[in-house]
Image (spheres, grey):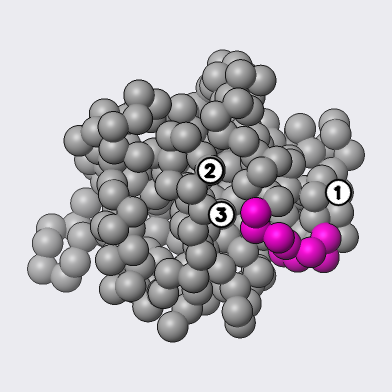
Amino acid sequence: MRSALLAVVIVAATGCPKRTADQIQEAHMPHRFENAEDWAKRFEDPARDEWQQPDEVIKALGLPATASLADLGSATGYFSVRFARALSEGTVYGVDVESSMVDYLKKRAETEKLKNLTTVLAAYDDAKLPAPVDCIVIVNTYHHIGERPAYFTKLAASLKPGGRVVIIDFKKGSKRGPPDTEKLTPEQVTSELAEAGYVASSSWVFLPDQYFLAFSRK
């Protein structure tokens, strides 16, 4: 599964009927992730390390210890906590739209004494990052985001000059993740982010079930 499987949804384009937040959520999020304690058993399962390879992902990004980073769809903190330890002199934001997940991660950061890890309760149309960051990481969540070009166009304001957006998501054909009908190809991701004003800058191929792509602003 993913570290958060949560959608960030933007209201449909001008001319479409305005929908309530609950209606938008229902259309884009068939499942809720409200009970963080229960989901933690899955998201934090040590067996996940074998295929998710979090330490190798962090190493590949090559961020200095002083970097700032946002983990969008942070859930129970599988990646957020690891990034906070790696970026010991920087700042990490664990961002989620589920208050249960945000509360869980906040308590976890306090328990594990990660003073550089700050939680953020996002809106469906706004990551609500308190400051621009060097890197925005989105793991196993991109395929849940609605109106992606519009969302990522807006998100660009949360990147520092030279900053990167990193997408890790499930490959079609993988037995992990959602059904193939819900998965997106790397080519589609690249095309949608190009529409939002980004250009592909790096990619890695060591993850067995996922593609791993980085983008910067044009």
Element assignment for label 2: loop
Rendering coords of residue 151 (x, y %): 37, 64
Is 73 rendered above or below residue 68? above
Label disc, if present, on residue 115 of the rendered structure? 1
Residue 130 in the figure: left or right of residue 99: right
Three-letter amino acid code of the residue under disc 3? Val
Does the magenta run of residues contain 102? Answer: no
Residue 97 in the figure: left or right of residue 133: left
Residue under label 3, please give it: 137
Viewer can see residue 143: yes
Element assignment for label 3: strand
For the residue pair 58 and 149, the one nearer the viewer reads as 58
Is 3 rendered above or below residue 7? above
The quadrant in which the C terminus is found is: bottom left
Task: Give the residue at x 67% y 31%.
Answer: 104
Residue under label 2, please give it: 206
Label whose residue precedes the other's in the sequence (1 or 3)? 1
- The answer to whether marks 2 and 1 mark residues whose Cβ atoms lie closer than 8 Å is no
Residue range of the region highlighted in magenta in the rendering: 60-68
| Badge nearest the viewer, 3 or 2 | 2
Label whose residue precedes the other's in the sequence (3 or 2)? 3
Three-letter amino acid code of the residue under disc 2? Phe
| Badge nearest the viewer, 2 or 1 | 2
| Badge nearest the viewer, 1 or 3 | 3
Rendering coords of residue 77 (x, y %): 65, 37
